[in-house]
Structures are given as C-alpha cells and as structure tokens.
Image (cartoon, rainbow, N blue to C red):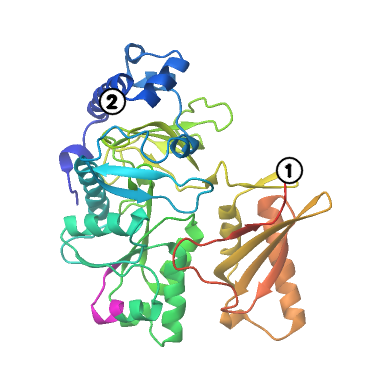
Amino acid sequence: MFWNTKIECMPSEELRSLQYRELKSLVNNLYSFNKFYHDRMKAENVHPDDIACLADISKLPFMYKQDLRDNYPTNMFTASNSEVVRYHVSSGTTGKPTLVGYTRNDLGYWTEALARSLTSVGIGSDDTMQVSYGYGLFTGGLGLHYGAEKVGATVLPAGTGSTERQIELIKDLGVTAIACTPSYLVHIGDVAKKMGIDIRRDTKLRKAVLGAEPWSDNMRKHIEETMGVRAYDIYGTSEMAGPMFTECEERNGIHMAGDIVYCEIIDPDSGEVLEEGQKGELVVTMLKKEAMPMIRYRIKDITSIDNEECPCGRTSPRISRISGRSDDMLIIRGINVFPSQIEYTLLRIPQLAGHYMIIVTREGALDRMVIQVEIKEEAFSDKIEDMNKLRAYVEAELKKYLNIAAEVELKAPGELPRFESKAKRVIDKRVF
C-alpha cells in the first residue's frame, strides 16, 4: 500500500537526478542569500559551480549542532518572521537549545513524509491512533498527529502521563495503533497487567510506531511477545523537522524519502564518505526545507545505508536500525560501549525485564560500570543462592558481548524508575 506511488517507486536514476536538481538549487540559494552558509563555503574554498554532480556534495562543509546553538535563535533562518508559522525547541541539550522554524511548506513536507510512513506500516482511515508522544516544544506529538490525520486515521492526542487513563482509552475507544517511545509502551504493558488488563486479549491495539530513543530488536521482540503489538521503528530529529521516516511492513530498514532528504554515511573520525553497507555516522541534507535548511548535517547516529529496492517495491534508500551515537557512546577503560549493546544483551536473558539503568563512576583511575536491571515477577526468588547464580550469569553474558566486565545489581519488579517521555538509561558520574 502506497501513499505516493510516483515518488515512492521512482526509478533510482530518476531519483538521483531529482536529488541533484534540488541540491544544486539549494546550494545556489544559500550561497547567495544566507550569510552562514556563504561564509562557511568560502572558508572551505567551495563554490556552487563546483557542484557538478550529486557526488560533489562531499565537497560541501559539514554542519554541526553547535552551529545551531551559536546562531540561536534565528540567525540561520532563511525565511522571514512572517513566513515562519511554527517553532519547535529541542529537549535534552546542554547550553543553548536548538530552535527549529517551519514555513507552511515545511509543515506540508513533514506531514507528507509521515503520511507515506504510516501508510507503509498499514495505518489508514480504518484506524484509531493514540499519540502518546509529548505535545508542545517536542516535535513528536504534533508531527505524528498531523501525519495520522493526513491518512484519515482517527487521532487521540493523549500526550504523556496519566498511564492508567491512557490504558482505559485504548480499551474503551478501540485504539488500534499507538505512537510513543518504546520504554513508555513497555510501561503501559506493565501498568495494564497490574490493572488486570491484557493488551493482547482485552484491546484492539495491534500496531505501534516507536522512536525518540534507542531500542533494539530484542526490545521489539519483548513488546510483541508480551503485548501482541507489531512494532515499527520511526526515525527523525528536530533539526530535520521531527520524526518522519519509518520501516515498512518488511521491517528491513527505515525508508528515507529521497525527494525530501539526501543521506550519506561517513567515518566519524575522518569525515570520509563510506561505501554502501558500511556502518558509520549518518549525515543528512534536507532538500526542501525553507525556514532553516540543513546541508550535510552531522546527526551523530551510527547506521548504514542500503540503496537497493526494498521487497515492498519502494526505491527510497533505507538506513539500518540505529546502533548508537558517535557522541554518546561510553568509553569504559578504553572500550567503546553503546547502551544499545547492553540492552541487546539484557533482553536476550528470559528472566530479565526491559527496565535497566547504567551507572558509571570513577574510583581512583579506574572506571566502574554498574548495570541495574529488573527481574521478571515469575523469575524473582527470595533465595540468595538463586539470585547470585542469575547475577553471575548476567555478568558473564555482558562480558561476552561487551568485551568488558560490568557489575550487575538485580532489582525487584517495579523498583527502577519509569519514563513517560525519553528514557534516561545512563547516569555517568565521572569527572573528566
């Protein structure tokens, strides 16, 4: 099922030609009318005339999140105040936030991308979709809201919080799809169980569009097995516009709409463009943004790209599941560790639940990593011997997959904090 067959199934050569035309126009305009981009290109000794083919995009300088903070609030905008119809502000940053502006056309492309994405996972006019992302400055709630309305779904703008009430609405209104963070959906499942409600048996909820935080295939498996909900990954950042792109029913990579965004994968250290299939840092160029264009923006997410046609028939490039970030990985005693690696390992162990915390400290010159993880109710035991045996097994599994030793603290069901928005999995107490 397609929302825009002409674009979604466009032959690859035709798509690349379209991308080049959009890029050439974008670079010309920004060089001529935007001081930031003009100065950045001059400093790198590159001119719009140097962009003679799509591959020449590698000649253009990178953009960084710090650029957005340095030019806060609107110095990077290329649209006037009268043309900007909405602002969103990123959360979870240090120092100045990142402010993103939208023209009416920007909102239109964002909604179009989400209409394609939701259609690709089978959500349409027969669905009632509960949006349990935050509304307001965060992009998630409003983005999914307008995308779901675009495909004709009935939208329930639940936002975050009031979990018991959300579960009642899922049950009473026959909600068939939900959009939220994966950790919040796990929390919904836990609370529903305490309320005596079986999501699989007592509700019509069957699809979940999950993102805004890293999650693994094991987390997907856990959600699907315990709740009977088919889970799909959604990707986007506030700088791009917000959550925009999802997996299709094949669930073999996230489709990145080629007429809206051009993707590169680079070596995080050298900045060199990597070949298709190699894992590295994602760099995006937003081809159509008006209020705040983005050329070669380094997102810091680690992934790979596949340009082959998907079995679903879509020809748009696909990125693999985000495996971590080049800037938030933990370096523990010289070893690079991503929280997603830890989650993957924990969720392979059937006695453990999907709730965990990673606490890193420094004692003298040595790093110490403690992983707190909840045990499932059915696996919990009052016998110290049983718990010691399980803890030793978990520690051995973590060392096998991480190549580094970590201490494990087993927690009783419900002991660790729950998060209704983005989960805070890492507490790094080291002073560098």
| Residue 190 locus on image (x, y percent) | 47, 78
Per the image, the residue denoted by label 1 is 334
When asked about the image quadrant of residue 354, the answer is bottom right
Disc 2 residue type (three-letter): Leu
Going from the N terminus, do you reach mark 2 or mark 1 first?
A: 2
| Residue 64 locus on image (x, y percent) | 47, 34
The span picked out in magenta is 169-177
Per the image, the residue denoted by label 2 is 26
Q: Is residue 57 above or below residue 308?
A: above
Q: Is residue 295 left or right of residue 331?
A: left
Name the residue at 32% across, 11% down. Answer: 49
C-alpha gap between disc 2 and disc 1: 42 Å
Residues 239 and 372: in front is 239
Residues 268 and 71: in front is 71
Name the residue at 69% across, 54% down. Answer: 400
Disc 1 residue type (three-letter): Gly
Residues 89 and 128: in front is 89
